[in-house]
Amino acid sequence: MLVSSLSTIVGARWVKVRRPELAPYDADGLPGYRATPSLAVLPGTKDELIAVVCELARQGVPWVPRGAGTGLSGGALADDVVLIGLNRLTRIIEVDPVNRLARVEPGVVNAKLSRETTRYGLQYAPDPSSQTVCTIGGNVAENAGGPHCLKYGVTMNHVVECEVLLPDGTITRLGGAYREADGYDLLGAFVGSEGCFGIATEVTVRLVPLPDAVHTLLADFSSVNDAAHAVSRIVATGIVPAALEMMDNATIRCVEASIYAAGYPVDAAAILLCEVDGVPDGLDDDVALIRDACMTSGARGVRVATEAADRLRLWQGRKKAFGAMGRLAPALVVQDAVVPRTKLPDVLAAIDAIGARHGVRVCNVFHAGDGNLHPNIPYNADDADESARVHAAMSEIMHACVRAGGTITGEHGVGLDKLPYMDSLFDAESLDAMCRVRSAFDPDRRANPGKVVPVHACREWHGTRASRSGARP
């Protein structure tokens, strides 16, 4: 019996089978989807994890890996299959300050890693908004970004090696900590594979020096269009900001009415948060150029924070914006798409018109510097009419982004949520190629079944019954 064999490996306490024990795994950070695992197993060591995956392989059982459950695409949901929880694998195995590397287990929390490396004057740069709870393993699975990815890059730019547990129980190493691996870039294929290729048991990441000086600018605008044009003007100066974020009035008001209030002007149609860092010499010149770009674009004012406490307060409002939206409605659609920077004004205007046409409230907060949009709609999932309008609006928004030359995800992944859009973005040959790459890692398709690539494109129907109130057919 599966429960008995897994209990022998990890201990009965760490195999969850009762419905109340499984309830916390019903959803990830995108609350509209629901799926219940057949059981959850929580290994406490790498050896236990390997033994669990080997046992599941022996019995031919499909499974889904899960970290902190902060994902925003339904990617970590297990629909009547085994869920493997990785949140007990929390060791920072090694910090190598000389070579600026750290080796960690997948359950290490993102922010904890940077806290541990600050003593060496180093940090782990990728900083998703959920960084205080999300894990490095989950960041690798989703190729997570964050506000500071504009200058520093996303997860794949900082992962140099992974020890990977393949679905058949085999251990392999991808990449190289101290030299580039020979042959194909299999590490590049694995990062962002959303748990469909295997599990990273150890992750070696690149660390970067803490900047000598940091200045954070807050510019407020009387129109979203002006703020969007300011983004292109800032980039045109030749400066690469560490971060360049945008929030609209709906989001500003939501944040300022919450415990995360950051002092944003509630009468602004939009604000830009722009951060520059580096050596002190020349940083004031960068600030002056960015200020001029904002004022030329119609900013009402620009203020600069140089003290750590002031900067942290400004960033708290941005990073906790999704949490603040929980006050508006019991459910929230958090969307993720990317468009060319120059198309931001047109696409934001289209999003506003779509929201108005469907009678839903859209809150925009996003990585403006790289065109990574996050239109969010708070709603009541128990209201069938409202749910239908919300999902119709989101479908139109996603297709508008694709028509603008964009794509359907920048950092949240495809998971379940973006499956309906894959056919509109990729032709049958491209989808088939994705299936064949997946088969090279997992020939039996037991790892995270029914995610990322539409199952009909792989000429099979493993599928998933995970559902969402008012979801698209």
Image (cartoon, helix red, strand yellow):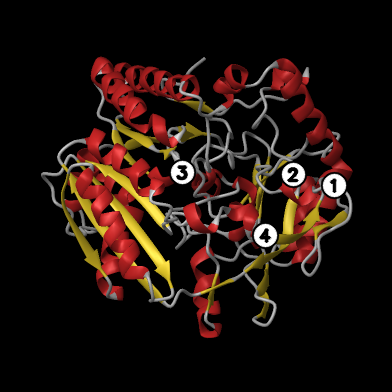
Q: Earlier in the sequence, mark 1 or mark 4?
A: 4
Residue 367 in view, yes or no: no
Q: In screen coordinates, is 426 left or right of 318? A: right
Residue tagged by mark 1? 184
Closer to us: mark 2 or mark 3?
3
- Disc 4 + disc 2, Cβ < 8 Å: no
Mark 3 lies on a secondary structure that is: helix
Q: Earlier in the sequence, mark 3 or mark 4?
A: 4
Q: Position of residue 105 (x, y in %)?
A: 67, 66
- Disc 1 + disc 4, Cβ < 8 Å: no
Query: How packed is label 4: few (under 14 Cα within 10 Å), some, or many (20 or more)?
Result: many
Q: Residue at x 33, y 18 (%)?
A: 389
Q: Amino acid at mark 2?
A: Ala
Mark 2 lies on a secondary structure that is: helix
Q: CA distance from mark 2 to mark 3?
A: 22 Å
The relative height of residue 334 versus residue 121 in the rendered view (above or below) is: above
Q: Earlier in the sequence, mark 2 or mark 3?
A: 2
Residue tagged by mark 2? 189
- Disc 2 + disc 1, Cβ < 8 Å: yes
Q: Amino acid at mark 4?
A: Val
Residue tagged by mark 3? 370
Outermost left residue: 267
The one of 279 and 94 positioned closer to us in this rendering: 279
Q: CA distance from mark 1 to mark 4?
A: 16 Å
The one of 313 and 377 positioned closer to us in this rendering: 313
